[in-house]
Image (cartoon, rainbow, N blue to C red):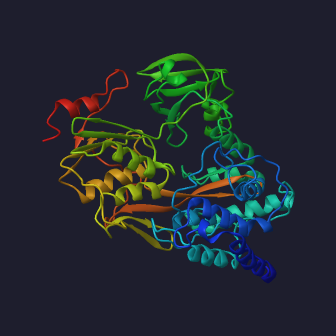
């Protein structure tokens, strides 16, 4: 960036502080609203000021400074626009700033896990990234021009050569055409590395915003095999149509997987407008069944639980950006627990920070929770506080083949540090021990690629492509209404 722009950035900070009431902000602990306002106050002057989208966030009021700044960011494809409530009042952490900088500048900054964000840290990091050349394409406003597309293709190749876990495969590649990006990335044969063109990304964002409906299933797929239903969402169209876990999708809309351009397009065919119907064929226990399903907007569950006598049962459906707060809220609601059952069956993982924060509540301070091994460096993630929750004897964690990624981290770390108290019950897990980075480009295309392999504590063996074995093996049959795993817990000697 030019020196003049850097000076304007610093002046923006000064102008903001002079206009902002000191009482409205604690410089030693910023809220998420403070972070967004300060961050985009500095960045917005560099972008096109024409706002062409209304914000969908349910708790950002029109006429406020934050609404104006987020509108500019959304219009410049620098921030998503979702029909949700932002966690504005929660305390911001250094990792929250790291996420924003990574997405806008394609730059990784050093931060302390679960450390409260301060103004000084925010200011220092913004000055630093403004002094670097962004790896993300900075082309003309017309991102559909040939030059912009070439820059995006070059950026994808640069990112892969710099950070991709198997970057040695790319030593021979000097140039990639934009039109062949999807095929090029798919040709790496790494199942978690994917390039989404603008149309594919828009479909995903529309689905997040509730503008498309679906049937209500979690799917899992290995390589180019047909997707398998890992779980059917409660009260969804799929449940009403009697779809079950372990069902294999054979056709969607009477078309086979091979008749679609990609697996993503095949799965996308399940989505459509509310009340529209879709025909699916499934394979179950060797039989082919046909179902006509009416789509609906799906409400995805996050965290659920119940207390029975002295046992607190917590179902963790996934680890998203609100999981830690939801988990602590549920635990506090129970008041006291003598025994725990944590159910991470069919939990695909997602946000590693959230699961490490939950582990912070159990694992003693300064213990290594996991190590991310990048191509050039290793990053240790440690527990950062005195634990607030006691690991009871026994604490039961329910796992299955659809327990993956961050959910496996939770189960494995708990078992590693509390081998005598924790019992793993169910079936072996999926075995996903890799970390992905997501970078979005000005034309709304996106690359998701594997940047690291994670290891638990001081162990030297990765779980990737391996899996976690249960202490007590129990398989929940998809062909019965009862939950055999929970039944074993309540009627057997698992508690002894």
Locate the N terminus by quadrant: bottom right
Residue under the point 21% across and 31% down: 490
Left or right, residue 6 beside residue 187? right
Q: Nearer the viewer, residue 469 or 273?
A: 273
427 relative to 139, above or below: above
Residue name at image x 18 percent, y 29 percent: 491
Question: In this rendering, would 368 be left or right of 294?
Answer: left
Along the line of sight, the residue nearer the viewer: 75 or 247: 75
Q: Is residue 33 left or right of residue 364?
A: right
Can residue 431 be seen here? The reply is no
For this rendering, which residue is in front, 414 or 245? 414
**Location of residue 121 by image quarter:** bottom right
Residue 174 x %, y %: 71, 67
Exactly how many numbered labels are in the figure?
0
Q: Position of residue 344 (x, y in %)?
A: 37, 42
Camera sees residue 478: yes
Classify 297 as above or below 294.
below
**The C terminus is located in which quarter?**
top left
Image quadrant in which you'd find residue 33: bottom right
Residue drawn at (59%, 25%) of the image: 251
List x then y, in percent, for residue 126: 65, 74
Query: In the rendering, at what x and y percent does residue 110 appear?
Result: 52, 73
């Amino acid at each position: 960036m030019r020196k003049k722009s850097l000076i304007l950035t610093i002046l923006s900070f000064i102008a903001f502080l002079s206009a902002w009431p000191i009482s409205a902000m604690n410089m030693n602990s910023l809220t998420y609203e403070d972070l967004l306002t300060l961050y985009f106050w500095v960045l917005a002057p560099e972008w096109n000021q024409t706002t062409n989208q209304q914000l969908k966030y349910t708790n950002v009021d029109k006429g406020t400074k934050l609404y104006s700044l987020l509108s500019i960011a959304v219009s410049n494809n620098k921030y998503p626009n979702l029909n949700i409530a932002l966690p504005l009042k929660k305390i911001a952490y250094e990792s929250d700033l790291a996420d924003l900088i990574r997405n806008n500048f394609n730059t990784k900054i050093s931060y302390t896990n679960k450390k409260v964000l301060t103004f000084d840290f925010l200011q220092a990091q913004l000055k630093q990234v403004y002094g670097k050349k962004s790896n993300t394409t900075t082309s003309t406003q017309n991102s559909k021009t040939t030059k912009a597309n070439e820059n995006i293709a070059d950026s994808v190749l640069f990112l892969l050569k710099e950070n991709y876990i198997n970057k040695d495969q790319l030593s021979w590649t000097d140039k990639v055409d934009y039109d062949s990006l999807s095929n090029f990335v798919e040709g790496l044969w790494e199942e978690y590395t994917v390039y989404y063109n603008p149309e594919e990304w828009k479909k995903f964002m529309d689905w997040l915003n509730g503008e498309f409906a679906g049937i209500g299933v979690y799917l899992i797929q290995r390589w180019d095999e047909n997707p398998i239903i890992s779980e059917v969402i409660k009260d969804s169209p799929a449940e009403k149509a009697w779809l079950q876990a372990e069902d294999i999708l054979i056709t969607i809309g009477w078309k086979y997987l091979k008749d679609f351009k990609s697996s993503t397009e095949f799965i996308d065919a399940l989505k459509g407008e509310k009340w529209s119907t879709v025909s699916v064929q499934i394979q179950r226990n060797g039989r082919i069944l046909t179902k006509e399903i009416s789509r609906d907007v799906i409400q995805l569950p996050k965290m659920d639980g119940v207390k029975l006598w002295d046992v607190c049962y917590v179902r963790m459906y996934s680890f998203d950006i609100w999981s830690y707060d939801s988990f602590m809220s549920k635990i506090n609601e129970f008041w006291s627990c003598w025994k725990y059952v944590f159910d991470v069956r069919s939990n695909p993982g997602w946000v590693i920070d959230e699961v490490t924060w939950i582990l912070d509540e159990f694992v003693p301070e300064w213990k290594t929770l996991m190590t991310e091994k990048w191509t050039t460096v290793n990053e240790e993630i440690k527990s950062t506080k005195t634990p607030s929750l006691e690991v009871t004897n026994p604490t039961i964690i329910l796992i299955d083949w659809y327990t993956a990624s961050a959910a496996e981290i939770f189960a494995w770390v708990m078992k590693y540090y509390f081998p005598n108290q924790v019992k793993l019950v169910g079936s072996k897990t999926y075995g996903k021990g890799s970390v992905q980075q997501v970078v979005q480009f000005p034309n709304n295309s996106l690359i998701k690629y594997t940047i690291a392999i994670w290891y638990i504590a001081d162990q030297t063996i990765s779980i990737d492509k391996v899996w976690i074995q249960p202490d007590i093996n129990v398989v929940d049959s998809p062909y019965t209404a009862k939950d055999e795993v929970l039944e074993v817990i309540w009627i057997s000697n698992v508690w002894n």
